[in-house]
Structure formats: C-alpha cells, structure tokens
Image (cartoon, grey):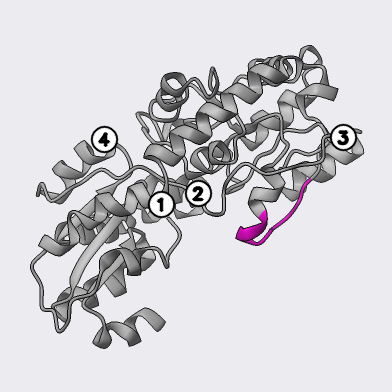
Amino acid sequence: MAALWSLGTRDAVYVRAHALAWPVAMAARLRGRVLVEEVNGTELDLIVSRPWLRPLRPLLRWLYVSQYRRSQHLFPVANELADWLRAEARHDRISVVPNAANTDLFRPMESDPSETFVVFFGGLTDWHGVDVMVDAVRDPSGRRDSAGGDRTACDRAWSRDAVRAGLPIRWLGYRPYEQIPGLIAGAIAGLIPMTNSARALVDRHETRSSCSKTLACGIPVIVSDLPGQADLVREGRCGLVVPGSDPAALARAVAQLAANRDEAREMGERGAALVRAAHSWRAARLEIDKVLPRLPGRRRQVIAPSRCLTAKPR
C-alpha cells in the first residue's frame, strides 16, 4: 500500500518479482512508470516453502509471468534463470546480476577465538537443507563435537528435538540484519546445503545471497553440489562442495575445515577478495546503472540510479 501511494512521485519502480508484488507492478505500468524487476526464482519457490499453495500454482504462475512480460527490464540472478525468462517473458530485455553482499556491513572482523561453531542463516525451509544440517550433527561419523560446533541455526521444532537429544545445536531466532555479520564472524564455515526438494527445484541454478555474505566476512562456505553456488566455490577456491542431501558428507566437510584452520582461513580470505571484486552491492549496482538510464519512460527530473538502489538491500 505504501508503494502504491508513492507511485505519483516516482519515475521508476524496482521490485523483486513475487506474486504479492503484482498490484504494484501493474499499477506502475498503468501510470506509465518505468518498471524493472529482480528475479530470484519462480513460483515453485513459494510452493516448496508453502506446500498448501500447490493447488494455486496456475494462478501464481500467471501472477509472476504477467509481471515479466510487462517489465521494461528483468535482472535475473543466474544465467540459467535468464534463459528460462526469455521463453516465459517473450522478450530479451534481460541482464544477469548475481546476488551480492553489502561489503560495508559484511566484512572480516574480530571474533571470540574460544568458540567453535558453524553457522546457517536464511529462510528455514526444507530446500535450504535444515534437515540435512541436523542429520549431519546426529551422524556418528561426523563426530558431532566438530560437525555442529555449539552454534548452528535451525527451526524451532528441530531445535527442541535437538536439545532433548543433547545435540550441540542452538537456534538463534530472528535477528536484525545488522547483527548477522557478527554471528558469522569466527565460524569455521557457513553452511549452505541447498537441495532440490521434491524435484520442484530441479535444474535450479543460483548462488544464494547468504553465500556472498558469508564469504564477504572472510569465512569459507560449505555448499551442496548445485550449479551456481558450487561453480563459485570451486572457481574461487573459497570453500568445499558436498553432494546434496548427504548429511555424512556435510559432517565430514565441517570436520575437515575444523582440523585445518590455516586452510580454512586462506579459503575465507580468497572468498572475501572475490566478493569485493565481483559480488558486492557496488558491483551489482554498476551493472544495473548501465541499464536504467537507457530505459524509455516519462521523467520529470534526472535521478542518479545508484543513489536510489543502495537504499534497498539485495
């Protein structure tokens, strides 16, 4: 409602594509505003995280696709997603801008050396591998003292079960965005065991934003072997790649980094340098700034796009 109310004073709307963004996107086009959308996934993401929406998939798909077709430009976060969009949107006004991190906030910092832990942050959904992480702590071959440390985030139900079982898992709950770098600092690694849950995310190609944020803090990541995030880690030599949905492999990877701290520190340093160079907000903003000034639309004044875009976290 706030966005709809402010349309009269705006020249352009930059929105993350989502079913609930449809009213703002359509209103922007009806009022002749420039409409650009960041695309992080499809309607399947909603269905995987909220299975009760499955009967509404045709409606959800229409809400997404109708926005794609009316947008003056689309910014998908991966090349494969861009290929999919060309078929669905029926135009080629598309530029790939990968997920990025605010390197002013997410950066290497001092931490308490007495703590030994791995960390997960993000949406607590099945396809983010929450169950895989908990099972990795349970797996005897992973030596749970090193495979979970004393601080791993999981959802409330898993946390209660883990406490009853005496597992070294701590659920941290919701935290303000600005606190996340402090929670990452000092970790052995950040865990990103994304899965293709229920085949709904088959052929998913994406580097999750939590990957860039963790690396920006100088902490290596352990990711599942999915195109996008695995490619980034392998090419940057900034973490370990494990098979998807394999708790034992995840536990072994954590144990490997815990036993080789110098190697882990070097991975983290390479990751931080990589994010600063190519996956920072500044890098993403520069790519978007190349497109926005060229878009046709009614403008009452010239506004530097970079000053607007930094106000909204990617």
Residue 307, located in which quarter of the rendered image? Answer: bottom left
Q: Secondary structure at mark 4?
A: helix
**Distance from the alpha carbon under mark 4 to that under mark 3:** 42 Å
**Most foreground residue, 80 or 186:** 186
Q: Secondary structure at mark 2?
A: loop
Residue 207, located in which quarter of the rendered image? Answer: top left
Compared to residue 158, the image places residue 63 above or below, namely below
In this picture, residue 293 sits left or right of residue 263: left
The disc, 2 or 1, on the residue closer to the chain's N-terminal end is 2
**Which label is found at residue 184?**
none
**Distance from the alpha carbon under mark 1 to that under mark 4:** 19 Å
Q: Which residue is mark 3?
A: 114
The disc, 3 or 2, on the residue closer to the chain's N-terminal end is 2
Q: Which residue is mark 4?
A: 79
Q: Are marks 2 and 1 in contact (CB under 8 Å)?
A: yes
Q: Callout 4, which amino acid? A: Asn
The disc, 3 or 1, on the residue closer to the chain's N-terminal end is 3
Compared to residue 292, the image places residue 103 above or below, namely above
Q: Secondary structure at mark 1?
A: helix
In this picture, residue 240 sits left or right of residue 96: right
Compared to residue 131, the image places residue 243 above or below, namely above
Q: Which range is magenta?
A: 171-179
Task: Sort mark 4 into few (<14), some (14-19) or many (20+) by Cα contacts within 10 Å.
Answer: some
**Which label is found at residue 103?**
2
Predominant SS along the magenta part: loop
